[in-house]
Structure formats: structure tokens, C-alpha cells
Image (cartoon, rainbow, N blue to C red):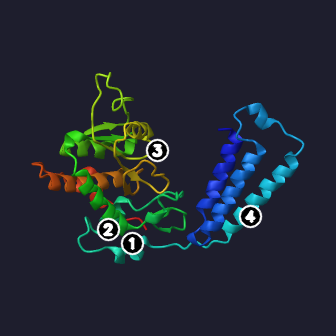
Amino acid sequence: MPKKKETLLEKAEEIAEELTDEVKEIGKKVVEGIKEAAEDLGIDKPKKKAVRKKDSNSGEKEDKLAKLKAKAEALAAGIETKDIDVSKEIKKEQKPGALAPIEDYLKSSIHLGTRAITPDMRPFVYKRRADSLAVFNTELLDDKLKEAGEFLAEYAPEDIVLVCKREAGAKAVEMFSEVTGIKAFVKTYPAGILTNPNLDTFMEKELLFICDPWTDKAALADAKRIKMPVMAICDTNNYTMNIDKIIPGNNKSAKSLGFIFYLLATIYVKKRKLDVKVPPISEWVENWDTLVPPK
């Protein structure tokens, strides 16, 4: 993608991120307008010379883009974002029978998303903080983790493969693999291991579990090719195409991933009646006992 187009679209996304739900539809129209203007400029062409070359109508087109960006910035500037205490705002949402106390959800930072919110993940978002970070609805997180644990327990350990390229999840994934017996690949994913029967390392599995649809996109593509069901941990900036079971939550933090895999391991061992002991949460997340829930 040419640098000019990339910068333009990134700017559009940054502006759109600041819009609240009240002006969501207006924000979408503004972003679409900017993208259309980008196409009109022809900056999606791969040739660098074509990008640098100015035609006779460049001034008119630049004015059009400037007006569109000014309109989007004006909309964003008019939005008030309140500083909220998440622990107070969502404590009332916890229902009886939750997997863990609300304080543990907050300590793990599983509820903190990114500044970007895709349409796929918007239903799981509770609010946006003053610093523009999205906040997941913890009640939904608890429900979805329960569903994911039960869904995972429908498959035997030998039928599942877990992939986590992100280094932050390496420790938790390795512990989860050791406890449950599920095959896991951390940091690297061997290309073709699920799709090429000619490889000595080829394996046949029935479910792919990934930690991030973006960083683990190679494994996701292989699963799509062979029509294998996929379960994935999805942050607010993820798209969920080709994902069969979504686990909403922070997938970039070692604390959050440790908490998620601890809860899933607990459910899986119980449902499958495995004769193993799940280590305490303090072994999954470093300094767990001294962590303070973020505001």
C-alpha cells in the first residue's frame, strides 16, 4: 500500500476512534468519504512515480480532502469523554455464579481494549475511557469465557491445536498445554502443518484455537482452507471473519492472557474430568497477589 494512502487511512481511523456511539453513523460516513476521496486521487496505485506525480487537478482534490478531514476533526472535537472509575461503574453488572470476582477481572486487565473498535467487536464494548481506550463489558466477558470453556471441552485434547505467536502469551499457553495435554505452538507456527500431508510434521486436528486473529493469521488461513472450526481471543481492534467461537478480551497483555488461560484450563479439566490439578492463578500471572486493579 502506498505511503500516502496508508497515512490518509490511518488518519481517518484515528479520527473515527474518537467518535462515541451517538455520532457513530456520522463518523462512518465521514471515514467513507475520506476513503472515496483517496480512491478519486488514484493513490491506491502501487507505482511510486504515479503517487508523486501531480496532475492539473491536484489542488482541487487536496481541497476536497482537507474539507473532509476538517469535518471529521470538528465532529470528534465536539465529543465529550468522561473519566470513569471502571470498578464502580461495572461492579453492579456481575451476576451470581461468575467464574471469578469482578476484582480479578480488573486486576488482569482483561477488560481493557484498544483505541480502535471494529464493528465486529463493538457489541462487547461497555464504554470508552477518557484516554480513548475501549472498556469491555465484564459481564459479557464472563459469559463468553464460560461458553468458550464448554465449547473447548467438546473436543478431546488430541483433537485441538493451540497457536500463539505473541510473546506475551507464551508462558500461559505453555502452562495450558501442559495441564490439558493440548498441542500448542508458541511464537512460531510451522507453515503447512495442518494442510500439507507430505510434511513429516503434518497433523490432523478438529479445532484451531488462536490468541489473536491478526498475529496468528497464518494458522487462521490454514484452518479456513481446510474448513476447520476456529476459536479465538479477540480484542476490540480485531475482525472476526472465519472465527466460529469468539472470546472477547485483552489479547495483548501477559496478565490478561494468563487469566484467560487459567479460567479455560479450570473449565476444561472439570468438564473433561481430567486427573490433573490446575495451578493457582498466581502461577499463571506474575505478581498476581500484588496487582492493583486499574481505574
Between residue 115 and residue 85, name the one nearer to us. Answer: 115
Circle 2: residue type? Glu
Residue drawn 45% across and 52% down?
240
Q: Secondary structure at mark 4?
A: helix
Q: What residue is pinned by disc 4?
A: 71
- Residue at 29%, 26% in the rendered image: 201
Kind of residue sitting beneath label 1: Ser
- Residue 54 lies, in percent from the top left, at 85, 39
Callout 4 amino acid = Lys
Q: CA distance from mark 3 to mark 4?
A: 31 Å
Q: Position of residue 19 (x, y in %)?
A: 61, 66
Q: Identify the mark nearer the N-term, 3 or 1.
A: 1
Q: Secondary structure at mark 1?
A: helix
Check if mark 1's residue and mark 2's residue have beta carbons within 8 Å: yes
Q: Which residue is mark 1?
A: 87
Residue furthest to the bottom: 92
Residue 103, numbered label: 2
Residue identifier under label 3: 214
Instruction: Residue lying at the far right in this picture: please name it.
Output: 56
Answer left or right for 127 relative to 151. Answer: right
Q: Residues within 10 Å of mark 1 (few under 14, many from 20)?
A: some
Which of labels 1 and 4 is toward the front? 4
Q: Amino acid at mark 3?
A: Trp
Mark positioned earlier in the residue sequence (2 or 4): 4
